[in-house]
Amino acid sequence: MLLGWIDELGLIQSDPTKNILKTFPLDVKRVVISSIVDYFNNQNNTAKNGLSTTAHVEWVMEVVGHAFQLPIADHQTIDRAINVYNKWLFEENQRPIPLQENLQYFVQQIFNHFSLLFEERGPESGATGGQEERKHHIHLCNRVLDIFLQMGLKGDMLEEVTWNHILKIILGITDSTLRGKRGLPELSYGLLKVLFELWLCSLSDDKVMWRHLQEHGILWSKNNATINQWNSVCIGLTSRVINLLYGPSEGTSVVRIQWEGLNAKNNPNPNVGNSTTELDLPDEYVYYAWNQFLHIIGNPNKLVDPEIHLKAFQGIEVITHSLAYVGTDPPIKQLKEQKVDFRIPYAPDANSILDIFGPWYFEAVFRENASNFNQGRAVAYSALCKIFCRKGGSPIHTRYLSLFYKALCQGLEDEDPIVVIAILLGSKKIFCYEELVGSHILIRYYTKVCDKILGGTGNSVKDSSQNSKYNIEVRQACITIIGSLICFPNHFSSPNIQKTTSDQEIINQSTVYQELKFQIQTILQKALKSERNPKNLQYVIWAIVVLIYEEIDHNAEIAIVFIRNMLDIVKTYAPKPLKEYPPEVFIAIYEALSSLTNLYPKLAEAEPMISREIVFQLSTIIPMQVALLKQNQTSAKLIEETFYSMADWVMCGPSVIISNKESITKVIFAIDQGLNIVKHVGVPGGVSAGVESPTATVNPRASTTGQAITSSSTSFSKDDIENIKISAEFVVSHLMNHVSHFPITNNNAALTATLSEESQCLDDLEPENSNYVRFYIYDNQFIISLIEQPNEKGGPGVTMIMRDLTGKYSWDSRVLYGEVPKPYSELEERGCYTGSNIENLLGKTQEAETNSTLMQYSIERPLKDRDTVSLFSDLIEEEEDNENLFLQTIDNEYTVLDVSCREPNLRYKYGGDCKASMSRLLLSTMGLVHIALTSRFVPLQSNSKLLRSLRNLDGTQPRETHKVGVVYVKEGQDDQQDLFLNAEGSEQYTSFVKSLGWNVPLQEHLGFMGGLDKNGSTGTNAPYYADYRTELMFHVPTMMPNNSKDPQQIHKKRHVGNDHVNIIWSEHTRDYYRNTIISQFNFVHIVLYPLNRNHKGLLRVDVMVKERTYPVFGPVLDGMILSEKVAGALIRMTALNGSRISRSKSTGIMRPYLQRKSLIAELAQRYKATVETDKYYCSLFVSKETSNVILDPPSQKKNIK
């Protein structure tokens, strides 16, 4: 009997005077028990009144108690017996008076009887009946377990002795099931749940009781259920302890236990089978129970079953991870919404965690001859790496560091790949933390393993039994490790520090790190050739870019080697169907090549023809990719990116490309393939190929991705075709407009003119009404404004403003029929002409020129004193004398008749109504008003709507525009309000900000403003960067003035909070929280930590993205270490690529030149005049008002508003 088992355990003593019905025949027992149970179920009020003494109650309970020993075939009787006890326990008005008076004693007896139910018993019928009876047995046991749980909730009605008795009963039941093999195995998880939950609810601090639990826990530790439920309790208690120690932002406000192994089949009762329990326990007891439960199973290294050993360490690892990473990701937004007063806590230092759990972990990793336990060892290694590899906390004790380094050295050379993999995944950022003093002694161990895995020289790890996804993660970890070491050789080879090897030889540190440099380069070369996972290969490509930037001043030849390696991949695989590599790999290569254009001058020193080599290869690939696109074997996006990368290299090294006939021919042929893409691949959806309608409407807000239109021959979309065509147009436009010209100015590296029709107009009228301004459009792509300049020195001229998809350009012109002007070299220096401006002429009169012909008729005469003239007649006589003298001097000219032929007089060009005569002359001279071009070069209707459309077009930047926030974090700053109150940063931070771009005065800046104001409210200066196709404005709160009336500094957050990418410079002692700045737009955080303790001059970088599905972007990757000299350029490019990706994921955003083309097409459709030839030419000779009458808009456009 089960009570006997409990008695043998020494938990309770059985009463020999009980169990009277034991010797009775079963049929007799059934009749007696059924009768009594039915009577108390049906007439309990009457029955309970008949129990007037304790002996009466004991007699009835003797009978009812025997119900729990009946065969399960009598499950209905047993169920009714449970009902009787359930009423007596929980319904006070249903209890017999003697039971109420001696409640503690009878409660103990009831639970004694309940224990009898849990003993397994054989079926009385066949196999089928046996299965049914087992189900009934499980159901009945769960009912009783539910009563145990309910009693735990009513703990205030129980005295300590009763609590202990109940705990001993459930302890004995559990022991009988787990160890004595006398119970139902299916109840193991449920029994352990009830036992642990009741134990916590009892608030017992009885050392004897806890010793009983720990003694049995060690005995039960051979059972999976024990370890799983022990893990659940320890994790739940840990979470509550963390909440109590570190505040509301961490852990849980109650003991929340997520139980294992509970299912509806074995635990049909909803309370017993519930997988989550929440217990509100006293704070002090939580600490006590946590410490006690941690040791219930004893030392986990004593577990003899490898699987159970693994489960135990998996649970312990969860506990230590929770402790080590306190404060790493607090729910700031939710806590602020709930108005909870909190401070983000500091995690416990590694020493405290190791003092508790270190002995278990180190014993596990140093375990010898334990190959069967390697999975548990691997978990221990992983846990140790997570404890050590983190920022912040007190310095780690030397004894722990030495043990950790020794363990890593042994583990990295372990023959079992599971151990090696665990170390690599857990310590991939090990060299990023200054807290790990002396970690450089591990570099050679890590590089050796990474070389094996990435280089393919060893198969032990790569061919492990883990799945492919796991292998991908391991290789990615190796790339991260190598990426963190790239800047070490140049940084640490400078000091002439010596190091002693194992054979006591003294080696110069510089030599050691130079060898490391060679190893890194070799590993990356191998990885570039052997890596087949697209994501990992992109990581390798970007790591190579960082290495090139780091090495460009030391060894530019290695950059040429890597560039050619990447070109080899393009040359070998890009012309083929996308089988070996997906498009994102080639796109990463193209973006990587583009990122190296900043280094062109230094690359050209090592290889003068490198730009020609790259452009030649890319221009060769494009026609091949077009051919593959027709067969639906490549990506349209890939062709686009090839065009842009080719343009980048043409722009940076045009001389060596343009001067080579073969190269420029290849480029032009590639462009032709893009411009005529419809002819080469057709149009999806069955639309006939041909030239796109010049008046086709393009939605300027349409997404660049588009919806693929299904077709029988192609699966690419119309948008894909249009994007390829646009990219080709982009390349040819920039070749024609900007090669050898960009940048024309400094500061904003302007692409386009800033002149407007309003500033150039010479009358007081608006441009749409001015007689001096005319508007035309050519081929529906080029909008031309002609502004007469009649007051130009040297003769009247014309200012021409032209707009196309690449921007706005301005030229001044005048007729040269006379003397050839002097060469510029012979002219005196003068200010740069910026065009005429009527506003600058108002109120000013130019000084008249001296004319020698007129001056000869000037007569000098002294001014007489009025006092000497006495009479008016004297004045008359004097005037007559003067006139006679003058007539005598010119007498000869009037008496001699001149009949010679004279040169024609100059005509005044603006005497008539037409004020555009010079514009007409310019157009005629250029052949634009030839009768053959009247359908292509067309006037535009001049009205206020046209001017608004032109201003809208001018407001659309011809280059990609991006804005990035740069936030400074001081030590101890955790709240966004603190960050925005910073008015200045450290010297290192200031230098870094200067390296991101050049400083521009906002009041005078003509380029992209990024939403910043010119009135000084957002500062007077800001970092800005631009190239021929990108503008980047940085929002730097420390450069913006603080508002003393606004503690939140909303004017700063308005900009930084709306940026898709934020660069964080953190001098905090712990890692930055991604949600510190509450915003829905900060998709990418690039966090920099200066390593000033031991590695001054280096920066650790974390790249955090909001969505796990974010594509790979670089050059800087998460976990890299950068030197300060290259950080600015690399971080800027990374922020730019991150911003591009975040925009590509947003709907309704177009490339700027595609948007400009759409606006030009829309403008042409609205305002282009359609007139007959005679009216066309007539409009060139009449006033603006008359011309507008002649150039009537098409009838279908009259109602356009």
Image: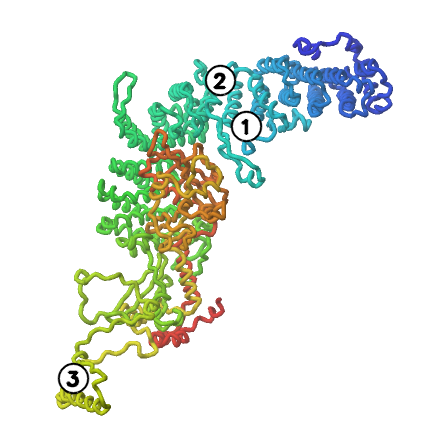
Crowdedness of circle 3 by 10 Å Cα count: few (<14), some, many (20+)?
Answer: few
Q: Name the amino acid type tagged 2.
A: Trp
Q: Name the amino acid type tagged 3.
A: Cys
- Gap in Å between the C-alphas at discs 1 and 3? 111 Å
363 versus 894 height, above or below: above
Q: Quadrant of residue 895?
A: bottom left
Crowdedness of circle 1 by 10 Å Cα count: few (<14), some, many (20+)?
Answer: few
1064 versus 722 height, above or below: above
Picture residue at 30% right of the left edge, 76% below the top: 910
Q: Quadrant of residue 604?
A: top left
Depth order, front residue of 1031/542: 1031
- Gap in Å between the C-alphas at discs 2 and 3? 119 Å
Return the disc, 1 or 2, that comes first in the chain's sequence. Answer: 1
Give the left or right position of residue 1194, taking residue 175 as reference. Answer: left
Residue 238 lies, in percent from the top left, at 55, 25
Identify the residue under disc 2.
360
Question: Disc 3 on helix, strand or loop?
Answer: loop
Question: Disc 2 on helix, strand or loop?
Answer: helix
Regarding residue 522, the answer to whether it shows in the image is no
Give the left or right position of residue 388, taking residue 849 as reference. Answer: right
1124 versus 792 height, above or below: above
Contact? badges 1 and 2 (CB < 8 Å): no
For the N terminus, the image quarter is top right
Identify the residue under disc 3.
901
Residue 438 lies, in percent from the top left, at 36, 24
As drawn, the label of residue 245 is 1
Return the disc, 2 or 3, that comes first in the chain's sequence. Answer: 2
